Amino acid sequence: MKKILQYLFEYKTLSRDQAKEALVNISKGIYNESEVTAFITVYFMRTITIEELQGFSDALLELCVAVPLEAYNLVDIVGTGGDGKNTFNISTLACFIVAGTGQKVAKHGNYGATSVSGASNVMEKLGYKFKSDGGRLQKEVEEAGICFMHAPLFHPALKAVGAIRKNLGIRTFFNMLGPMVNPANPAYQLVGVYNLEMARIYNYLLQQKGKSFTIIHSLDGYDEISLTNDTKVITQAGEQVLTPEQLGKRMVSATDIYGGNTTEEAAKLFMTILSGEGSWAQNAVVLANAAMALHCTGNYNNYNDAYLAAVESLESGKALGALKKLQAMQG
């Protein structure tokens, strides 16, 4: 690692193979904590290159615990995290609304490194038991329409750096990797990014994968459709900027989507919204993200049809029903 660090400190970048080898070695525990922290810190100082991100992604996917779920044409809704906005769990809520429409979901997530409550925090608080057993996950997808995959159970490298990421408490390149390495290999992805540079990188990488994707970035810095500002939307077909009015009927304020100060508060808010008792603004933001994910699947004529399907899922209780089925299966 000392050679790699010296190389990086000279403002050089890693090739795809070098990046892959470094992350494989991190996952095997070959380097000590100080070396790994220094390695991660390099990427606070400069933008990660596409080759480096590809190499890190290659390493995670090679070592990943595979889950045989491709037959279900799954969708994942995931933000890179690290936007520092401490919103409530918008992506995870949107996943349950999508599941309530009948579209199967494989949600990939982790504990919050930069926020109070990441997807794994809230799912654990709601009684979900993390697992990597393909048969049990398949049963959840079939019966509840959704399964959750806690990233460190599937990716040894993420487990190896979990404590370091938590102690640093700031965005790392691992935030960028999450959306690229869902073990279920979903057919469709809605990916939220925290800046336009990351949007450009993801666009390049996802185009290469040849799958249906939508990348979203709120122009005031959120890694999801926040409705606090216009949203850049990028797909295989090109890119456009859409207003809060186009996506969610009206604009909301940052305070409307604040996530609380504890995991307990986050879980309580999650249940309030999923039970149909959220504020107009909270509902609108979740529905907009769910609608964009549904639209990404190509099963709706337009975004508005997808939005109406999301509204029906929430208001009919089907979204809440998906969570209750999932909770009942955790015995």
Image (cartoon, grey):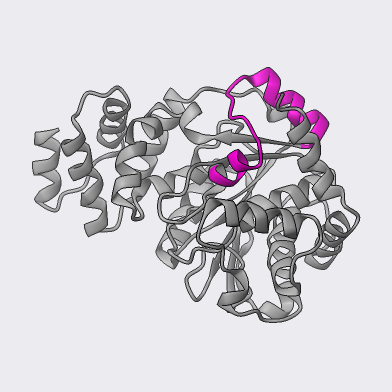
Position of the N terminus by quadrant: top left
206 displayed left or right of 285: left
Q: Which residues are magenta?
A: 121-145
165 versus 190 height, above or below: above
Res. 74 in view:
yes
Near-viewer residue (170 or 157) = 170
Image mark count: 0
**Residue situated furthest right in the rendering:** 316
Which residue is found at the position 25% from the left and 45% from the top? 40
129 versus 320 height, above or below: above
Q: What x and y, as percent, mark residue 256? A: 62, 74
Q: What x and y, as percent, mark residue 59? A: 38, 30
114 displayed left or right of 144: left
Which residue is found at the position 59% from the left and 72% from the top? 231
The quarter of the picture where residue 227 lies is bottom right
Position of the C terminus by quadrant: top right
Near-viewer residue (283 or 16) = 283
Q: What x and y, as percent, mark residue 77? A: 63, 50
Which residue is found at the position 45% from the left and 56% from the top? 115
Magenta span contains residue 130: yes
Near-viewer residue (127 or 103) = 127
78 versus 308 height, above or below: above
Q: What x and y, as percent, mark residue 289? A: 68, 61
Magenta span contains residue 156: no
Res. 236 in view:
no
What secondary structure do most residues of the magenta stretch adopt?
A: helix
